[in-house]
Amino acid sequence: MKAVWISSALAVALSATSAIAAPQNDTDWTIPTYAGPYQPQGTDERGLWTLDDEDERILRDSRLVIRDEKLNAYVRRVLCQTVGESRCRSVRVYILRVPVFNASMSPNGTMRVFSGLLLRVRNEAELASVLGHEFAHFELRHTLAGYKRARSGSDLLAWSALLGATAARFGTTNGQSYQDLEISVLGTLYHFKRDDERASDRLGFSYMAAAGYRSSAAADVWRGVMNEADRSAEARGRPIKRYDGLAYFASHPTNLERADTLSLMANRVPGGEVDNSEAYHEALAPWFGKFLADQLAEGDFGATDYLLDRLAGNNWTPDLLFAKAENFRNRGNPRDLVTAVDLYRQVLAKDAGKIEAYRGLGLSLLRAGEVSAGKESLSQYLKNKPDASDAAILGTMIN
Amino acid sequence: MAISLTAGVPAFANKLASSGQAQVIGKSDVRVLPQTDWNKLSARPGPQAEVWTFDGELLNAVTFYTGIPSGKPLLKEKDKKNRPLPKFAKDMLLPDLPGFLDRTYRVTKDVSTFDIESVAPGLFAGRKGVTFKYAYVGSDDVRRKGEASAAVIDGKLYMVTYEAPLIFFYDNSLAPYRQLVGSLTMGKAK
């Protein structure tokens, strides 16, 4: 009896949820009138909002949140430009120092943007496409709908899918014992249905078009992330073309077809050509080196190598070349050390002031058995950086 | 219920490492002579790893790694297919070891920030090696500090690490940890 009551109550709630509509077809790109942030109705929804508020309180105090005012203001400005001022007011943006491609938005208006996303997108248009897409899920109340779908399911499977998603945020099943706190900080991931994705894509494109951003950026992002997953798997000797191991795809079903659909849609959107890549690089500059170092420490050779290629395009800056060299040195096979030595030398040829390259060069040469050249390079490093954190140990290696 | 609880005990049979009594680490020939009572956890994070603690491993943990062979990771794999751990290589140089620990923790502890504060020459059981200090934030959002001493001996990695929350706990057990490291010896018992 109880079960019947619950399911009928949810059926009512579900029908209320589905009242929000995205633009109906691929030729209609008008943005629906915004009714303001949705207010929870009924015990079920109020309960979800209470949990969400509590998660946000824990998130707000987390050490993982990047507090840099300038960076926060910039990301918020891109979101506001994309979805418009009135929508933007319903959102609190938190940037998390987590080197994973992800962004999410929860029902109470908390947006989480991971540093791994900021490292991967190359311009404002690409960032806007992801932020707009996530906001569209929020405006269309997909998270709420997903929650209700799972709640209304009578079997355990739906619940385990819901809970399982939370474990997938790092692209892995997580056996840690203190996962509750992690969930609060990083956010619960809900599965979205393909229909939801399509609706969010459409609304996301409508925002991009209204804001004048280059709409094909959306497809660029998806292709990049899928290629990265392929390269990561390939370098680890795993079969390619599986994207469910990636945090973002754990909640967003996708495939190559979707990227193609996005391309097709992008061709039809009467959008602008705004990329603002210079403004993007300027805003990210103070953090770029740190985010690159975080990515390198992940130890995912294939993904990092692809990511660097994608970021560089035809313009290898000393920073990107240096990161590529470090990636090879970290893997450390004999042939990798040869490649690393070559890359460090290229870095120094481009920018003699990139002192860290002497360190990497020296250590690679020493490891490869070229002792005198290695010592000379380390000496150069120590001469220019006598107060380096590892100066004491390096000092013992040049004598 | 009572039976299942009793049956469960051996799996968590932690032991006391009494002060003044020499202790062998795992099945290795590494020995240590504690001057304080420590708890030896029976759960091992890896085949060549052993954890000692005062108040529980989240509050203060000393981890001994005794002879990680080339090609093996420091700890047990968590998700070998999707996120394999970095492997130790015998040609790694001493300055490479802090980075190796960093890359391991990114996976095993889901560490987001790992700062290496200093890397200096040090000793492990009287052998020349490296001592380094670091700090990190793990997935429980607690900032911890750490200190480690490591050496590569006969192509195998030997290391001991001490980690504790920055607030109160780190300073509180640092002295007994350093005493442990100072008492490390290797080789057959005399």
Image (spheres, coloured by chain):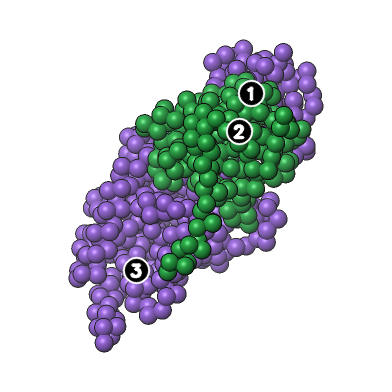
Chain colours: A purple, B green
Q: Secondary structure at mark 3?
A: helix
Same chain shared by disc 3 and disc 2: no
Work out whether B3 lies above or below B168. below
Which comes before the other along the chain, label 2 or label 1? Answer: 2
How much space separates mark 2 and mark 1, taking CA atoms? Answer: 19 Å
The chain letter for the residue carrying disc 1 is B
Along the line of sight, the residue nearer the viewer: A287 or A21: A287
- In percent of width and height, residue B159 lies at 62, 34
The numbered disc on residue A147 is 3
Work out whether A396 lies above or below A324. above
Disc nearest the viewer among 3 and 2: 2
Q: Residue at x 68, y 58 (%)?
A: A238
Q: Residue at x 42, y 54 (%)?
A: A179
| Residue identifier under label 2 | B22
Disc nearest the viewer among 2 and 1: 2
Quarter where residue B120 is shown? top right
Same chain shared by disc 2 and disc 1: yes
Along the line of sight, the residue nearer the viewer: A253 or A207: A253
- In percent of width and height, residue A184 lies at 35, 53
- In percent of width and height, residue B78 lies at 58, 53
Categorize mark 2 by other alpha carbons within 10 Å: few (<14), some (14-19), many (20+).
some
Q: Residue at x 41, y 60 (%)?
A: A189
Instruction: Give the residue type that dot 2 points to.
Output: Ala
Q: Secondary structure at mark 1?
A: strand
Work out whether A85 lies above or below A19. above
The numbered disc on residue B123 is 1
Instruction: Give the residue type that dot 3 points to.
Output: Tyr
Quarter where residue B169 is shown? top left
Categorize mark 3 by other alpha carbons within 10 Å: few (<14), some (14-19), many (20+).
some
Quarter where residue A202 is shown? bottom left
Along the line of sight, the residue nearer the viewer: A41 or A312: A41
